[in-house]
Amino acid sequence: MSVQTLAAWLRCPNCFLDLFEVTDAPSAVLGCASGHRFDVNRRGYVTLLPPRSKVVGDSPEMLDAREALLASGAYAPIRDALIAAVRPAAPTRVLDSGTGTGWYLHGLLDALGSGARGLASDLSPVAVARAARGRPEIDGLVADVHAPLPVRAGVADAVTVVFAPRNAAEFARVLRPGGLLAIVTPRADHLAELRERSGMLDVPAGKAEALTVDLDLWFSPASSEHVRYALPVDEARARQLVGMGPSARHAAAASALTSTAGALPPAVTVSVDVLAFTRR
Ligand SMILES: C[S@@+](CC[C@H](N)C(=O)[O-])C[C@H]1O[C@@H](n2cnc3c(N)ncnc32)[C@H](O)[C@@H]1O
Ligand SMILES: [Zn+2]
């Protein structure tokens, strides 16, 4: 990232004017024409939360669990399906919303080749720092997806959202006409064997259908793939799967898993939809 490449994505969270590099500041600073100023962190990101925001993103422990699971290749088929859905659109500017450790964005940018740039956005500063680390083609943004995004209109060729919260109206605004929105969302049977044992949160049935209705105002369906496979698990992997999800905040989930560890199945079902939509 550079201050210029970061600024090119962004608008002011207070007054919505474009952000630019403030060149007469002693450190890296972004500013708007109204005079609002934002420090750029040395770890490669800027925090643009609305005033008095109280929401929190994933904790470092959840990120550690996810990083370990993803590094093991457990979800490689999901990343491959995401790349297959996005690559034909040949985007050069990709916003990954709720990026986590950036594992999907890294794979996608590697597949798209030189010239492609990414904006790694998440509510968790620790997540964004990890996603941007050692990746000059990635700019980092700490923002709340449920607030108006501090991202310029029409600046993205593609938006990706993997297991993360969505804001259809804002994704529509930041995508250029003809741009691609790619979403990975779990099905009701995703990790069902672990859910039964650990009290992990259920996936509401009919999620993918509800989603399509939600997006209907701005998007047309482009492609859809159901990725389903058996993932071998041992106790360490089961812990990572529980620890990286939203249920990890409930201490009961981890202890329930411990008490039934002997009864772990040899494999769990991975079942997700990889859906792509075109911005009209
Ligand atoms: C289940 S994780 C998925 C992370 C990553 N896409 C992956 O699959 O590895 C959900 C992510 O969304 C982020 N998140 C939660 N609420 C958010 C919000 N309101 N705005 C932006 N990000 C949010 C969390 O911090 C977390 O990194
Ligand atoms: Zn401003």
Image: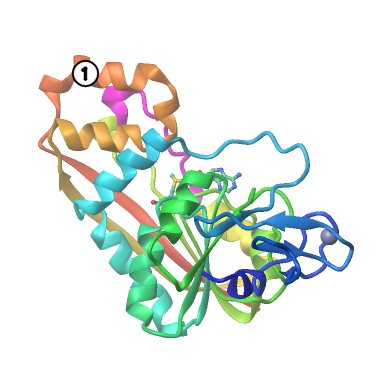
Point 63% across, 57% down: residue: 214
Residue that numbered label 1 is attached to: 258
Whole-percent x, y for residue 241 in the image: 29, 38
Point 67% across, 48% down: residue: 146
Point 65% across, 76% down: residue: 155
Point 72% across, 55% down: residue: 38
Judge whether residue 218 can be spotted in this image: no
Q: From which residue to which does the magenta span run?
A: 195-207
User: Is 142 in front, or is 278?
Assistant: 142
- Position of 7 with respect to 77 (left or right) is right
Judge whether residue 21 can be spotted in this image: yes
- Position of 64 with respect to 153 (left or right) is left
Badge 1 element = helix
Whole-percent x, y for residue 18 in the image: 78, 70
User: Is 66 in front, or is 206?
Assistant: 66
Asked if residue 235 is among those painted magenta in the image, a careful observer would answer no
Asked if residue 206 is among those painted magenta in the image, a careful observer would answer yes
